[in-house]
Image (tube, rainbow, N blue to C red):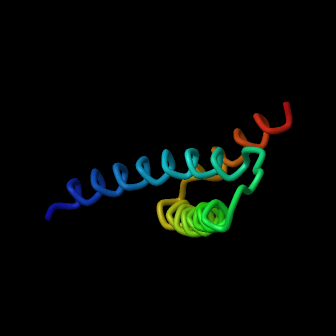
Amino acid sequence: MKDKDYKSLWIKLKEKKLKEYVEVHRSVNQIITPYNQYHLFEIANEMVSENELKRDLKYMDQLDGTHEFQNLLSDLEACNGQ
């Protein structure tokens, strides 16, 4: 594979993970009223997914020298504060 192909795949992967993080973040931050054990299990899985994505995206920012994920976190915090 050429460097150009790797770069394109990297960008697509990062965009996918950024979108996924937003979805998971919003899901976790909704007001949670657990109805049963299964609901609690779903919430725990969402939180684990959010933490894994956060770790991966911070590392990706570090590797590619961008601040895309950090900027996204700032935007999400600004939205939550309003």
Q: Position of residue 39 (x, y in %)?
A: 64, 60
The image shows a total of numbered marks equal to: 0
Residue at (50, 64) in percent of width and height: 60
Residue at (49, 67) in percent of width and height: 63
Q: In which quadrant of the rendered view does residue 1 lie?
A: bottom left
Q: In which quadrant of the rendered view does residue 50 lie?
A: bottom right
> In front here: 29 or 53?
29
Residue at the limit of the structure toward the front, as seen here: 36
In the depicted structure, whether residue 62 falls above or below residue 82: below
Q: Position of residue 14 (x, y in %)?
A: 43, 54
Q: Is residue 12 left or right of residue 25?
A: left
> In front here: 56 or 34?
34
Residue at the limit of the structure toward the top, as seen here: 82
Residue at (59, 62) in percent of width and height: 42
Quadrant where the image shows the C terminus? top right
Q: Is residue 37 left or right of residue 17?
A: right
Q: Position of residue 68 (x, y in %)?
A: 57, 48
> In front here: 25 or 74?
25
Residue at the limit of the structure toward the right, as seen here: 81
In the depicted structure, whether residue 71 falls above or below residue 66: above
In the depicted structure, whether residue 47 falls above or below residue 33: below
Residue at (77, 43) in percent of width and height: 77
